[in-house]
Image (cartoon, rainbow, N blue to C red):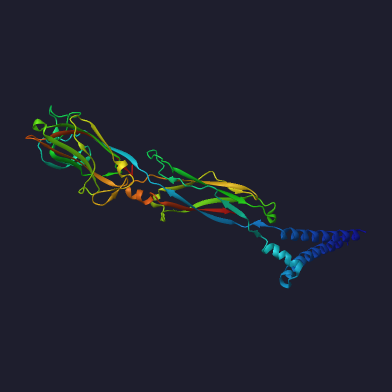
Amino acid sequence: MRSKKFKFNAGLLVLLLTMFISSISSTYAYWRWPAPFTGTVNNSLLIGDWFFSRQYNTGFESYTNTTYGTYVDQNIDGKLWDFSQVITATSSDDTYFGSRGLRFKNTSYIQSKDSYYGLESISFNFGDIRGGLFGWATSSFNVQISNDGSSWTTIYSANASSSFPLISINVENIINNGYTLGNGSVVDMESSLFIKINFTGWGLLQDRLVNMDNLTINYRSVVN
Amino acid sequence: MKNLKRRNVVLVLLVLFALAVSGTTYAYWASSVNGVQQKQENVINIGEGDAVTINVDITDPETHSDKLVPNTPEVNVGVGETKSITVSYSVVWNNDALLDGVADQAISATVSNILVGGVANPYSLITVTPGANPTTIGMGDTVVFTFTVTMAEPANVAEYNAVANQTITFDITFDIA
């Protein structure tokens, strides 16, 4: 009897083993998994342009020449200027702010040796015109710009006043959309420009004199 | 006598087990060699059915027309300008019955090939910073990736000229594994 019982159990074991192996095979056959995915997208964006505002101010307090002549590369508050027939103005006949200003005589000028990128505006006080017997005199002045420091184009002109008004020139309005200089160059707010202020005066038997002070130049820089 | 019977029983069990194992092994070889159709199905499930190509859509619904300027306080932002641009992408893993029940997968996105006017990120002025982006995605899910593009301030005119009014291009590569 014991022997038969063992034979029965062995058959059952074989059956179970066969079912187990069959089960493993079926499960494995239906196994799926996602393949690795890689996808690339390309982006395109625009960069603009920009600037930092700059301002140059001077009251010409460091300019002390008292003899008419031509003076080049004068460092006035960090910028270089040439002067011609312009001296410091400190007498009681002069009009100025602070301790001194400038006095122009007859045909005279100041001009920048440094250029100004993105020139926005120029302002200065100019006037107290005097000289010339019986009032026989002329006295005009103009403001010029240049892209090379040698060829000048007038952007503002007027007669000097007996008072001392603030002259303001909005250069940006003039050149913003492109402005053709006398030398054919077209300049705009991305140009670097030189500045010149001319005085042309004549007086009967006397020098024609005029004062200037408090020059402000607003311009731009692309780096901080 | 009793011990002899027990030995016989153990011997029978061992023989049966050996037969069962050898039978399975034989069946596998037979399918591969002879191409029995029923067994070949198992081979296909193992060899070709292992990895399923997943269906993924990547979309960027936004357009970016504002121009990028340096991300510094001294720069004034004008009309049509911005100090940062955020690009976003929706990644959709579309449902697929073949992968029902599959676990979430790892997902990543990397930025490469940053060019400005065709030049490789001049002076390293451009930075593309990833947002708090997802790390996993499930089948049927939509996840969103963001990247913020900024520009450092050029230190001199040469650096300014290298980037001003230029076009930035860069690649974002998405990986699901």
Snapshot quadrant of residue B16: bottom right
Q: Residue furthest left?
A: A205
- At horizontal 70% and vertical 65% (from top left) the residue drawn is B43
Snapshot quadrant of residue A30: bottom right
- At horizontal 45% and vertical 43% (from top left) the residue drawn is B84
Q: Position of residue B144 (x, y in %)?
A: 57, 46
Snapshot quadrant of residue B36: bottom right
Q: Position of residue B171 (x, y in %)?
A: 49, 54
For the C terminus of chain A, which image quadrant?
top left
Is A86 placed left or right of B20 in the picture? left
Q: Is residue A217 visible?
A: no
For the N terminus of chain A, which image quadrant?
bottom right
Is A137 placed left or right of A21 in the picture? left
Q: Is residue A105 above or below residue B56?
A: above
Q: Position of residue B86 (x, y in %)?
A: 49, 45
Is A87 placed left or right of A1 in the picture? left
Q: Is residue B99 visible?
A: yes
Q: Residue furthest top?
A: A92
Of A179 and B2, the residue lying toward us: A179
Of B73 and A81, the residue lying toward us: A81
Q: Position of residue B117 (x, y in %)?
A: 41, 54
Q: Is residue B57 above or below residue A96?
A: below
Q: Residue furthest bottom?
A: B34
